[in-house]
Amino acid sequence: MFESVTDAEIEAAIAQKDDPDHEDAYTVEEIRDVLDKINGYIVNNWNLYQDAIDVDAQEIVHEDDGIMVLADHSGHFWNEQFNVMDLPDDEHGILQSIVVSLHHDAARANCDFSWSVVYPVVVEKPSAFRAGEQQVLREIARRTEEFGSVARAVDTLATETHGWNKSSWASLTGRNPSTVSRTTDN
C-alpha cells in the first residue's frame, strides 16, 4: 500500500485539482488505489526503470530503507505511465494531475531537491524489495571479508555470480574494462 501520503493529503489534492462536490469527483479510495497500482507496476517492472536510470532519463535523488525518489529528466514518465497502465479513464487529465501533485508532496517531504523543471516519482519499497537489497549488501560484506576489497567483492558478485559481462559492468560503473578484469582475476 502506498503510504507516502495521508488521506488528508489526498483529500486536499482532490479539492485542488478536481471538484469534490461533483458526483463524478475522484474519491480518496480511488486515488489510493491508483497510487498503489502505479507503485506496484514500478516495483514489478523495476528493470525498465533501472534502464532509464542507467541512461540518465531518471535519477535517484533520495533513497532510504523504505522509499526511493526519482527525478524524471525525460519529462515523459507520467504520460507514459498512464498510457501503459490499466487505469480509470482520465479524459481531462484530472487523475494524472492529482497523482503527480501527491508525488510532488511526498518527494518534498522526503528530500530537498528542486522540482521546478523535473517531475518526481516516489517509489515505496515493498518488503521483498528491501529483503533483496539486504541480501545483496550482506553478500557484498561476506565477499569483502573474503577478498579484502570492496571493489573485488562487488565486481565478482556482478560478473561471476550475476553474469554481467566484464565490459558491460565496467561501462555501467564508469570504469575501464581492464580495471574490472584486474579486480576479478586476482
Image (cartoon, rainbow, N blue to C red):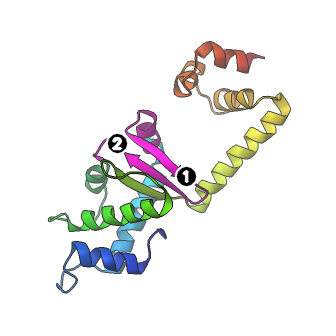
Residue sitting at 31 percent across and 41 percent down? 74
Q: Residue 82: x and y, percent?
A: 28, 56
Number of the label disc, if any, that sits on residue 106? none
Eyeballing the image, is 5 above or below 170?
below
Which amino acid, mark 2? His
Q: Residue 91: x and y, percent?
A: 15, 64
Residue sitting at 62 percent across and 29 percent down? 163
* 10 Å crowding of disc 1: few (<14), some (14-19), many (20+): some
Q: Nearer the viewer, residue 115 or 41?
A: 115
Mark 2–mark 1 distance (CA, rounded to whole Å): 17 Å
Eyeballing the image, is 101 above or below 60?
below
Residue sitting at 74 percent across and 41 percent down? 139
> At numbered mark 2, what does the secondary structure look like: helix, strand or loop?
loop
Residue sitting at 30 percent across and 80 percent down? 27
Q: Residue 15: x and y, percent?
A: 26, 79
Number of the label disc, if any, that sits on residue 63? 1
> What segment is highlighted magenta in the picture?
49-76
Q: Which residue is mark 2?
A: 73
Eyeballing the image, is 101 above or below 46?
below
Q: Residue 14: x and y, percent?
A: 27, 76
